[in-house]
Image (cartoon, rainbow, N blue to C red):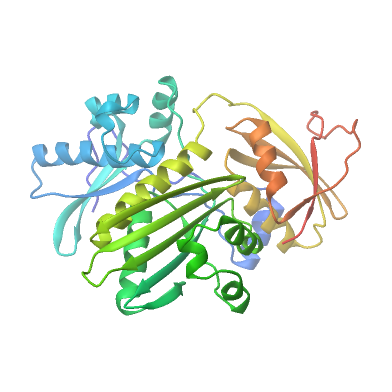
Amino acid sequence: MSTAAPSAPDRLHRRRRALPVVVLAACALLGVGTAAASDLYTAEVRVDGRQDAEREAAVEAGLERVIGRMVGVYHGLEDHPAGELLDDAERYLESYRYLRLDDELAVELRYEGGVLRRHLGERDVAVWGEHRAPILLWVATEIDGRRDLLGFAAAGTEGEVLETLHDGAEQRALPLMYPTLDLRDRQAVGFVDIWGGFDESLREASQRYGSAAVVAVGLRKAGTGAWRARWTVLTGEDALQHHTGPGELERVVTEGLDEVGGALTRRFAVVPGEHDGQQLEIALIGIDAVEDYLGAVRYLEEVTGVEQVDVQRIAGDRVTLRLLLARSPERVAEDLDDAETLWPEALPAAEVGPGGGQLTRSYRWQP
């Protein structure tokens, strides 16, 4: 049973995105959910007891963790403009409840995401929002002279590597997806490509997955038990590489993911309120079935800076959409132009969208 904070609602609320009635019906038929919620604003903190002082300390620690995910700074917020919010942490608490984590008492804390965003925007702090496109993660290991690529699951030491990466990414709200590692992937990418930081090989192999961000990590375990890691982060034309280690696996992964999260936040974060009210009207061609429509809307909702997708007109296989933005239209358009599932097509220069704005992009949907 949840215990509400004195000035907060009794229950957690999840923000839902409105879709046309026809689409909601189609979603029900296909078993597709329409909720667009995440745990970005939730933190679980272990406590020794249920005393007020214990909870108050946990509220501040949890808020520091949540703000860290939003701004890409996971340690040392006291020297960051966002750190000012920690002085009145209870103000941002929406609700809390006690639970057990590995047989230890903990408190689950839910914070007011909208209020946090507004106050960070007032301080000109850029925020990476809760709607984050999946990050394609390539993992290569060298353990006892054995080299391998790791995918969705593994056992033994390789399984420990994947679990450590997964837990670290979850703490930083970095949504991961993995390559299938079929014959095509294994012919295109090997340990040497990842450890050597050959980003062109990684770019080519990653194109089929259409991810806006690609991360590759090569991990080597020495005979002494110490680990080293080589990290590559690819976003658009940008590439960042760094090393971590030697050291224990958890420390090497933690330090590497701090750099990865910071780099991705710098790429995708925007100052809240800076671009509110801006929009982009686009046309999609090749929408032949409900599955195409749902897939396209889902994809567009994942694009960084797209807050809402509204349908303006459907004519044959052509759908006109208005994208409500929290990012500059130019940056959003750049990401759309780079998408593997959207093929740019010529558009009459004077065509006006149903929403009254000039259509600036037209794409053929190629899932």
Residue drawn at the location 46% of the way across and 40% of the way down? 265
Is residue 242 at all visible to an observer of this figure? yes
Left of 184 or right of it: where is 97?
A: left
The residue drawn where x is 61% and y is 57% is 200
**Residue at point 41%, 41% (across, down):** 262
What residue is rendered at 44% in x and 46% in y?
14
- Using the rendered view, name the quadrant where residue 220 is placed: bottom left
Instruction: Looking at the picture, tell me which residue is in the foreground, 349 or 18.
Output: 349
Quadrant containing the C terminus is: bottom right
- Establish if 326 lies above or below 217: above
Residue 358: give x, y in percent of width and height: 82, 30
**Location of residue 297 with respect to 54 vertically, above or below:** below
Whole-percent x, y for residue 286 in the image: 82, 57
Task: Decide if residue 135 is on the left or right side of residue 297.
Answer: left
Left or right placement of residue 192 versus residue 81 in this view: right
Residue 110 at x, y percent in the picture: 31, 43
Q: Is residue 299 above or below residue 4?
A: below
